[in-house]
Amino acid sequence: MSMKVVGDEEKLPSYWERFDRLQRTAGKLRGTQGAPRGVFRFTSFAEFEEWKRHHQSRPARPEEKTSFPSAEN
């Protein structure tokens, strides 16, 4: 996939900087923290579904939100 750039290419942030900003913005818009980090083992698919439902509906706590200034834009 190619991207058309209008203007000066040197002012365009790197791919990874743009991707990082997109991920932080998406996280802010989603409003939830997502699944906690780590390895989780479940005895049944039903137990996994219950765990997933609990963690997807939980809002992010203030200390878990990003503090990067570009996410505020």
Image (spheres, helix red, strand yellow):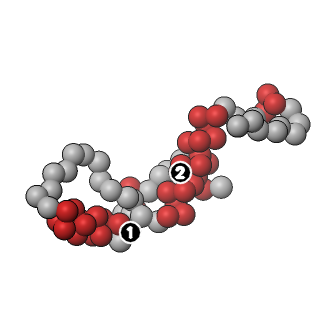
Q: Which residue is drawn at 82% across and 39% down?
A: 4
The answer to whether one can see residue 58 in this image is no
Q: How many marks?
A: 2
Q: In this view, does 52 lie above or below 2?
A: below
Q: Are marks 2 and 1 in contact (CB under 8 Å)?
A: no
Tell me the distance, in whole angstroms, between the alpha carbons under discs 2 and 1: 16 Å
Q: Where is residue 13 in the image (x, y as percent from the top left)?
A: 70, 35
Q: Mark 1 points at which residue?
A: 59
Q: What element carries label 2?
A: helix
Q: In this view, does 20 lie above or below 63?
A: above
Q: In this view, does 65 lie to the left or right of 56?
A: right
Q: Residue 43: horizontal and vertical position, in percent?
A: 11, 58
Q: What residue type is labelled 2?
A: Arg
Q: Residue at x 66, y 32 (%)?
A: 14
Within-10-Å neighbours for mark 2: few <14, some 14–19, many 20+: some
Q: Nearer the viewer, residue 7 or 62?
A: 7
Q: Quadrant of residue 26?
A: bottom right
Looking at the rendered image, the quarter that the N terminus falls into is top right
Report the residue marked by disc 2. 24
On the picture, is 5 further left or further right than 29? right
Q: In this view, does 72 lie to the left or right of 62?
A: right
Name which residue type carries label 1.
Pro
